[in-house]
């Protein structure tokens, strides 16, 4: 699957830092300087008014209004400070929400059909697998580990600037066998219930649809009888020696601290079969909810 999002987190972080510095400088320094200049100017204004009064010139309403206008003008924030102060709390709130709680993504390709469709806008839980520092994605608090069947967003191992989404089919230590388009996990054959064929309306093609029970997690997958059983041209990825490939499929043993990922659209997904395992440090979060699809409002809701 292609990139779900670019460097928006980095952009938000930079904006938050810049507006935060301006806000901090204004609260603790610039505002005090404006107040000091205003007090000096108003004192001079009052002294001049007092001299005029001593000379018999009576202050009128316009003079009083002039003082108020002068005070407001001297204390008014410059536009760049005013806008920074207004945007800083909003940017900080958005940055914290999407860094530590929930982050939105858009599905750009068909590798997770029929679970997720192109154009689905999804939410990803950022804390269920542990709290990570934004930008560098370093885990600082351990929580839950990914489980087989989870739909997970992660940094693509070949390009960490790109986010991918796939389903976890193997956790550390698992022996994964994919033969004739059927999964076996640790010697246990995964059960498949046939469903009505799936119509790809964009390409006007039908695909086999199955209810897969992945060690207790039931979800739908697609297979294409026209696609071969073997994996063509897999990469020489890290730990590739733990995988063997043949004409019927492949077998892999998942190394410690890493995960084996596959798309639900099994014959239309570039996943761990091709580019290898996903290290724990690449994990972004667990996808769990479609909050909008502009072309199909019925898509809104939770998914497995």
Image (spheres, grey):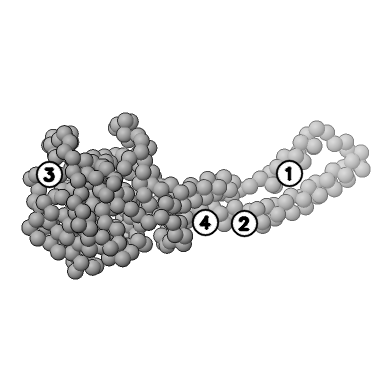
Residue identifier under label 4: 17
Residue drawn at (25%, 62%) of the image? 254
Query: Circles 4 and 3: CB distance less than 8 Å?
Result: no
Q: Nearer the viewer, mark 1 or mark 4?
A: 4
Q: Nearer the viewer, mark 3 or mark 1?
A: 3
Q: What element carries label 4?
A: helix
Residue 203 in the image, given as x and y percentages of width and height: 14, 37
Nearer the observer, 153 or 173: 173
Residue appearing at x 88%, y 45% in the figure: 51
What residue does disc 1 label?
Answer: 71
Q: Mark 2 against mark 4, which lies toward the viewer? A: 4
Q: Residue at x 8, y 51 (%)?
A: 228
| Mark positioned earlier in the residue sequence (3 or 2) | 2
Nearest to the eye among marks 1 and 2: give it. Answer: 2
Considering every residue shown, the one lying at the far front of the view is 188
Q: Position of residue 252 (x, y in %)?
A: 20, 62
Disc 1 to disc 4, C-alpha distance: 31 Å
Residue designated by label 2: 25
Looking at the image, do the residues carrying marks 1 and 2 touch, with CB atoms under 8 Å apart? no
């Amino acid at each position: 699957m292609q990139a779900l999002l670019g460097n928006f987190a980095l952009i938000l972080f930079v904006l938050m830092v810049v507006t935060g510095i301006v806000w901090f400088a204004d609260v603790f320094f610039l505002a005090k300087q404006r107040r000091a200049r205003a007090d000096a100017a108003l004192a001079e204004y009052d002294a001049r008014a007092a001299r005029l009064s001593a000379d018999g010139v009576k202050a009128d309403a316009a003079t009083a209004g002039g003082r108020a206008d002068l005070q407001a003008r001297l204390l008014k924030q410059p536009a760049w400070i005013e806008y920074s102060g207004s945007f800083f709390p909003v940017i900080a709130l958005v940055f914290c929400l999407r860094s530590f709680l929930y982050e939105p993504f858009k599905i750009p390709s068909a590798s997770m059909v029929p679970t997720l469709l192109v154009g689905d806008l999804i939410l990803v839980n950022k804390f269920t697998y542990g709290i990570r520092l934004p930008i560098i994605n370093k885990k600082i608090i351990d929580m839950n580990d990914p489980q087989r069947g989870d739909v997970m967003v992660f940094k693509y191992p070949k390009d960490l600037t790109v986010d991918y989404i796939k389903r976890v089919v193997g956790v550390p230590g698992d022996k994964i066998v994919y033969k004739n388009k059927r999964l076996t996990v640790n010697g246990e054959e995964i059960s498949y219930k046939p469903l009505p064929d799936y119509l790809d309306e964009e390409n006007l093609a039908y695909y086999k649809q199955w209810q897969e029970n992945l060690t207790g997690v039931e979800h739908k997958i697609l297979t294409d009888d026209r696609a071969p059983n073997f994996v063509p041209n897999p990469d020489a990825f890290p730990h590739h020696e733990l995988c063997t490939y043949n004409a019927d499929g492949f077998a892999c043993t998942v190394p410690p601290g890493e995960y084996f990922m596959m798309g639900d659209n099994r014959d239309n997904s570039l996943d761990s079969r091709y580019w290898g395992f996903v290290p724990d440090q690449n994990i972004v979060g667990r996808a769990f909810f479609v909050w909008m699809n502009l072309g199909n409002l019925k898509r809104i809701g939770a998914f497995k």
